[in-house]
Amino acid sequence: MFTEFCPKLRELPMVSSAITPKRTIAVLIGVAVIAVGAFAIVRSGVFEPESVQGAIPGPGSSSASASASPSPSVSEEVPTPSASPTTPGQIKAQNIADAKARLVKYYETTAQVANNGYGDWADRLLPFWGNPDIWGPTGDAFEQLANEGRYTTGAAEVVSSEVTEYKPNENGFESVALEACINFDAVKNFDANGDPIARQEGAPSRYMFSYLIRHQGPDTAWTINTETPQPEKAC
């Protein structure tokens, strides 16, 4: 279990695709860099662990996906959100708007956590994660960065996000699949001595991510359930 490697997670309830983390929600990723890149960080690929960009997974990292491949974009079919959604179309529009806003908030919160030395990552970011494939490896990575005294300045930016799939659910477990362009240009990494850590040569700083964001029931928070970096897709 990933909790063996991340002591802070032992005290927290497991969160399935149908259960919201029972920690107080603070605020989401320094996305404006997201993604502790937002999500599961694999120790291989274009970026080495020591060059994580502002707490977001770098190229070559990925998180397991529990959903099918996204269908063609349906963003053009989405009506304008309603102040008090009642019809299926209005509810869909509101859910999509809320899911997109949640992603932006997640990146903003992640940036705040990374800028502050990663020490409060559990309290701030666990409410955004709805799948152990994300909070397990990402939590481990953040804990290691905190122990090493690493930190960042700047924040990643969600440049754009397009809906690729929307699934309604009468019990309040709707899901929204997004293709998002994330820009890490403003993020700078530093070691415990305050010395800058250069981005690996040739590694992209602006590229696409695929997200599955799920509503965790009526009157509960949206969580990020899958996150897949696509460094080969410039944006």
Image (cartoon, rainbow, N blue to C red):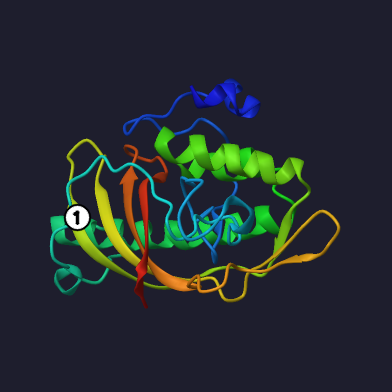
User: Which residue appears farthest toward the right when viewing the image?
Assistant: 193
Q: Where is residue 100 in the image (x, y as percent from the top left)?
A: 37, 62
Q: Judge whether 160 appears above or below 105 on screen.
A: below
Which residue is drawn at the image coordinates 58% and 21% (left, top)?
4
Q: Judge whether 14 appears above or below 216 on screen.
A: above
Q: What element carries label 1?
A: strand
State left or right for residue 170 relative to residue 127.
left
Q: In which quarter of the image is the C terminus?
A: bottom left
User: Disc 1 designates what residue?
Assistant: 166
Q: Quadrant of residue 193?
A: bottom right
Q: What residue type is labelled 1?
A: Tyr
Which residue is drawn at the image coordinates 32% and 37% (left, top)?
217
State left or right for residue 116 relative to residue 94.
right
The answer to whether residue 147 of the structure is visible from this angle is: yes
State left or right for residue 188 relative to residue 167.
right
Q: Position of residue 109 (x, y in %)?
A: 59, 56
Q: In which quarter of the image is residue 120?
A: top right
Q: Nearer the viewer, residue 194 or 35?
A: 194
Q: Judge whether 32 appears above or below 69 on screen.
A: below
Q: Judge whether 235 appears above or below 87 on screen.
A: below
Label tally: 1
Q: Where is residue 76 in the image (x, y as percent from the top left)?
A: 17, 74
Q: Position of residue 141 (x, y in %)?
A: 59, 42
How many neighbours does mark 1 have within 10 angstroms: few (below 14), some (14-19), or many (20 or more)?
A: many
